[in-house]
Amino acid sequence: MDYTGDPAGAHAYLDAASAAPLHPVAREALLASLADGWADPARLYAAGRRAQQLRDASTAVVAEILGVRADELTFWPSGTAAAQAAVLGGLGGRKRAGRVLVHSAIEHSAVLHAARAAEAVEVGVDRLGRLDLDAWAAAVRGDGVALASLIGASHEVGTIQPVAAAAELCAEAGVPLFVDAAQVVGRAELPAGWSLLSASAHKWGGPPGVGVLVVRKGVRWLSPYPQDDLYRPGPPGSLGLPQVVAAAASLRAAAGEAAAEAVRLSALVDRIRERVAATVPDVEIVGDPVGRLPHLVTFSCLYVDGEALLHALDRHGFAVSSGSSCTSSTLRPSHVLEAMGVLSHGNVRVSLHRETTEADVERFLTVLPGLVADIRAEAGL
Amino acid sequence: MPGVAVGEIVRVLADDPAAANDIPAWCRMKGQEFVAADGHAFDVRRVL
């Protein structure tokens, strides 16, 4: 591998959609609450009351930012746990209606795994990764539909989904809608009309190990897990309270910065979309160029092994992810790229965050064309 | 492809799990026609 001509620069972490770097506010809150919030919030002594205060304050902060009531919100051990609890609990609460789960073809794999507990009906997307609303309308009106699930915006290609329109169709059919908002919360406006929602703290700069589940008032939700003595529906076991406090503090910070960051990062994403298309031959920039998340862009290169490109970028200091089959745990191409019918070979997802600088992006754009050309040359092209 | 006359069909044999998705995507990107798939066999017609 030829390293000459590689502009000097620090390592750049460009995989915020997997896990955003910890927000400095989260670090401070985590350290403070490790000292102050370790006791069991259910106990009646002073340390327990202090923990309860921290839990209630964290719940109130996150509820306010999401625009919901505090008693509609619970914290879970991860975004995956929250999303799966939404699906399984939503299905459980609507057993009498049937056992069909309508879901988009581009849900997170966590939701697709939970969908195996139901009779799943999948609804496709177009080439840009947008839900087929006509097919959705027909599907949610079908017999025995207990729940519908639609990701707020694709974690793989960034396309924002027509949640409000899908929610209206669900409401007409009397079907509750679950929205996986992991990539939306803390970055963009939440859509309206959903019944259940999940999010994940380490996507907005909080610590890993905190998921959020919202179940709106009047929505039937039955915990898929054994419950406690008082039947307070929620995750089994103790809450990771210091992480929850840090998650709440960082969400407040991220939400405060979100509008300005969206403008800044979206311009950098536009730059990546334009420059990669102009400087890398035989490349497809995927996802909706306009109705998209502010911080995420995905492209696929013909005649390039995704794993080879990932490693080449890593050697040059860039951390990105890929939906190519050779890079996945299943050795299958990304189901999202397949559903869109776009190239899955040589796939790269770049996702930016508050610490990403213009210089990081410029260095990436300078280095990328040469790396792609080198891999193609090695393959004899 | 350069050795194939316009209008002729090439049968691609591929057991890569991505082939069913990526061969039609290649056709779209390169302006060629994807004809049909049968198991691990994919027919592509050169149109350009």
Image (cartoon, coloured by chain):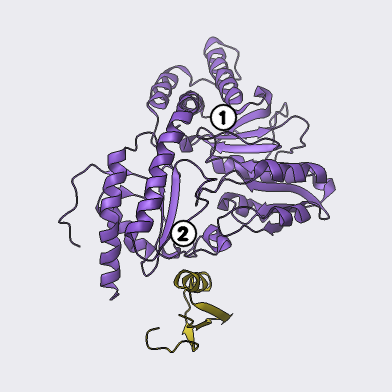
Tell me if mark 1 has few (under 14), some (14-19) or many (20+) residues whose alpha carbon lies within 10 angstroms of its own.
few
The residue wearing badge 2 is A329
**In the displayed structure, would residue A293 be above or below residue A189?**
below
Instruction: Identify the residue at image location x=28%, y=45%.
Output: A362
**In the displayed structure, would residue A158 be above or below residue A257?**
below
Q: Secondary structure at mark 1?
A: loop
Q: Secondary structure at mark 2?
A: loop
Residue A354 as seen in the image, left or right of residue A167 = left
Residue A173 as seen in the image, left or right of residue A160 = right
Question: Furthest-left residue in view?
Answer: A4
Q: Chain of mark 2?
A: A
N-term-proximal mark, 2 vs 1 = 1
Q: Confirm whether circles 2 and 1 share one chain.
A: yes
Q: How many marks?
A: 2
Q: Chain of mark 1?
A: A
Among the chains pictured, the one given purple colouring is A
Q: Amino acid at mark 1?
A: Ser
Q: Nearer the viewer, mark 2 or mark 1?
A: 2
The residue wearing badge 1 is A238
Residue A212 visible somewhere in the drawing:
yes
Instruction: Identify the residue at image location x=78%, y=31%.
Output: A218
Closer to the camera in the image, A306 or A78: A306
Q: Quadrant of the N terminus of chain A?
A: bottom left
Shade of chain B as shown in the rendered figure: yellow
Tell me if mark 2 has few (under 14), some (14-19) or many (20+) residues whose alpha carbon lies within 10 angstroms of its own.
few
Q: Residue A200: x, y in percent?
A: 53, 37
Q: Quadrant of the C terminus of chain A?
A: bottom left
Residues at marks 2 and 1, CA–CA distance in whole angstroms: 30 Å
Residue A111 as seen in the image, left or right of residue A314 = right
Instruction: Identify the residue at image location x=41%, y=19%.
Output: A32
Mark number displayed over residue A65: none
Quarter-wise, where is residue A283 in the image?
bottom left
